[in-house]
Image: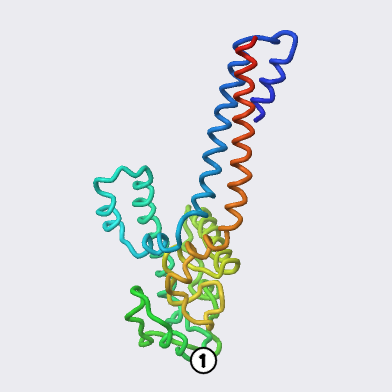
Amino acid sequence: MLIMGATGAMCCGKKYKGNFICVLIFLIFQACLVVATFVLAVLPFGVYMTPPENLEWFCNSTQEELTTFFTGKDDWYKDLVIEGRAYVTDVDTSLAARSAIMCTSVCPCAVENWDLWTTAAATDANEDFTTTDLEMSATGVSDWAACETLLGEIADDTDAAHIEAAKNYYNSLLEVLEDDFQCQGICEGSAFWLYGDVATGPAWGFENACLPKMQESFKSKSLGASIVLFITVLIDLMLFICMIGNCKKD
């Protein structure tokens, strides 16, 4: 936008007024702006148009199953979907690793009993949930932050500061998701909430995952954003056509 403004000002100046190269450069940048705005408009529109059942199908499929499904197909987004599933698995696995530490001997939880877990509908990831190795305590932890304190500080080495910064950033992101969207993981939560009160019960299941929760939260907002951006594309395109028309007359 700044480059277009500077180019437009130059084209209106006495020195470059009517200069073909100057006008051509302006048109090129304007065409790029139209394309970029269109791409930005398509992204939130895609969020609005994606059916919830497609998200559930994505989460219930492994990377290998998705690769098989897209074999022989020319969909432009297939690589994005397949690689994205691998990333989702890594994120959800890292959450499950933390959840596996919660409510154990190193981090006993401040819960009265395990009724909320044993009576909750099990998912594929938690169908074998057992309380055998779990521990509770009146003075136990209620979230991951308290558990992390019990686990102690990270090893003192040359990369400690960088590791700590990355860990704090990751922790704050997970905390925002749990606090603001009441979700955990991308496709699958874990047995315990990490930043909410652990006594509220399990976080497992697709219904507690962040992918469907965030789509539901942003769906109406994404449609509004797409409408505004598509109107902007239309205005920019009309200006572009008018500029070409004026250039032909000149």
Depth check: 100 or 89 in front? 89
Vertical placement of 88 versus 237: above or below? Answer: below
Depth check: 144 or 157 in front? 144
Residue 94, position as x, y percentages in the image: 41, 64
Residue 156, position as x, y percentages in the image: 48, 60
Depth check: 234 or 148 in front? 234
- Number of on-image labels: 1
Asked which quadrant contains residue 131, the reply is bottom left
Residue at screen point 57% across, 32% down: 34
Quadrant where the image shows the C terminus: top right
In this rendering, position of residue 130 left or right of residue 11: left
Q: What residue occupies the far right of the structure in this picture?
A: 14
Within 10 Å of disc 1 (Cα), the crowding (few <14, some 14-19, many 20+) is: few
In this rendering, position of residue 50 left or right of residue 71: right
In this rendering, position of residue 211 left or right of residue 123: right
Quadrant where the image shows the N terminus: top right
- At label 1, which amino acid type do we have? Glu
Residue 230, position as x, y percentages in the image: 59, 41
Residue 53, position as x, y percentages in the image: 41, 63
Vertical placement of 190 versus 225: above or below? Answer: below
Vertical placement of 121 versus 170: above or below? Answer: below
How is colour applied across the structure in the image?
rainbow
Vertical placement of 226 versus 212: above or below? Answer: above
Residue at screen point 45% across, 59% down: 51
Residue at screen point 38% across, 63% down: 59
Depth check: 6 or 105 in front? 6
Q: Secondary structure at mark 1?
A: loop
Q: Would you name the residue on which mark 1 appears?
A: 112
